[in-house]
Amino acid sequence: MCIGSFLNVVIWRVPLGKSIVSPPSACPGCGKEIEPQDNIPVLSYLILKGKCRNCSMSISVKYPVTELITGILFAFAALQTGYSLAFVNYAVLIALMVVVVRTDLEQFIILDEVSIGGTVAGILLALLPGGLDILTSLVTAVAGASFFLLIRAGASIYLKKKNIRTEAPEGFEDEEDEFQGGMGWGDIKLAACIGAFLGPASTVIAFFAAFILGAISGGAMMAFGGKKRNTPIPFGPFMAAGAVLALFFGEPLWNAYMNLLG
Ligand SMILES: [Zn+2]
């Protein structure tokens, strides 16, 4: 949960180009520095009933939820890996995916620090004994990004032909081209990162899950949320969910699928 608390800082500051180490966290309402006893993950939020101690400005529930989800996923990771180096892989990928979900949902941003930095981290972590080898990690990263690049290229051509233009979300009007093609460049770079961590079989599961989750959610949002077909929906959160699912259940799901094919 402490790592989740740190991720909250990353999610808030890195897109603004601010340092993640200084100054210490302060209330955005009154600017008062947050005291250590008010900075305990989840617990402080509950004790303060979601309000700043100084000015009573309400604190978003996103912060404790991020801390709790990070803590729960880390606990599951520890259960699955035990005391082994594999835990490092799990923890790093989970942390990266938590950041993707938040930044992409809130700002249509997948940070390069996460996608490109994550790809490098995934390849380097393949040097640890017990997991993927470095070549497999590298090749899956390239393959993952290539696959998403193909989707973007194909979708752009198709949408242009059909004369469908996606509306850029508010605040992104000058980057309208980025939203033409189904997948953004951030998604393509994120695909490399997921590939680098998971290797071929689990990456297939992760992408498959992402597309299913995306299709279900997109359909539901159009049916019940009043979303139009040309309203962009960030795809990063689905990729992140698929990656975490594949991290925990990739191997059994892959084997089940292979058995199904006989
Ligand atoms: Zn305050």
Image: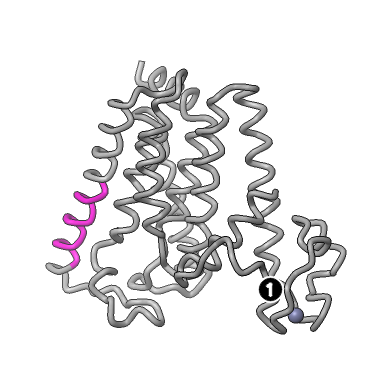
Q: Residue furthest front?
A: 22
Question: Residue at 41% across / 65% down in the picture?
Answer: 109
Residue 44 lies left or right of residue 157; in this view the side is right
For ligand 1, give the image quadrant.
bottom right
State the residue position of label 1.
26
Task: Give coordinates of residue 5: x percent, y percent.
Answer: 66, 56
Is residue 33 located in the magenta-colored stretch of the structure? no
Residue 162 image-quadrant placement: bottom left
Question: Would you place residue 148 above or below residue 53 in this image?
Answer: above
Task: Give coordinates of residue 33: x percent, y percent.
Answer: 73, 73
Foreground residue among 257 and 203: 203
Residue 30 image-quadrant placement: bottom right
Task: Give coordinates of residue 139: x percent, y percent.
Answer: 25, 32
Question: Residue at 59% across / 66% down in the picture?
Answer: 22
Q: Which residues are magenta?
A: 148-159
Question: Would you place residue 6 above or below residue 129 in this image?
Answer: below
The answer to whether any part of residue 59 appears in the image is yes
The answer to whether any part of residue 45 appears in the image is no
Name the image colouring. Answer: one colour
Task: Give coordinates of residue 174: x percent, y percent.
Answer: 28, 81
Question: Residue at 42% across / 47% down in the picture?
Answer: 210
Residue 134 image-quadrant placement: top left
**Residue at mark 1: C-beta within 8 A of ligand 1:** no
Q: Residue furthest right?
A: 47
Foreground residue among 242 and 132: 132
- For the C terminus, the quadrant is top left
Residue 68 lies left or right of residue 44; in this view the side is left
- The three-letter amino acid code for the residue at tag 1 is Ala
Report how many numbered discs are placed on residues in the image. Answer: 1
Crowd rating for badge 1 (residues with CA inside 10 Å; few <14, some 14–19, many 20+): few
Foreground residue among 18 and 143: 18
**What type of secondary structure mainly makes up the magenta span?**
helix
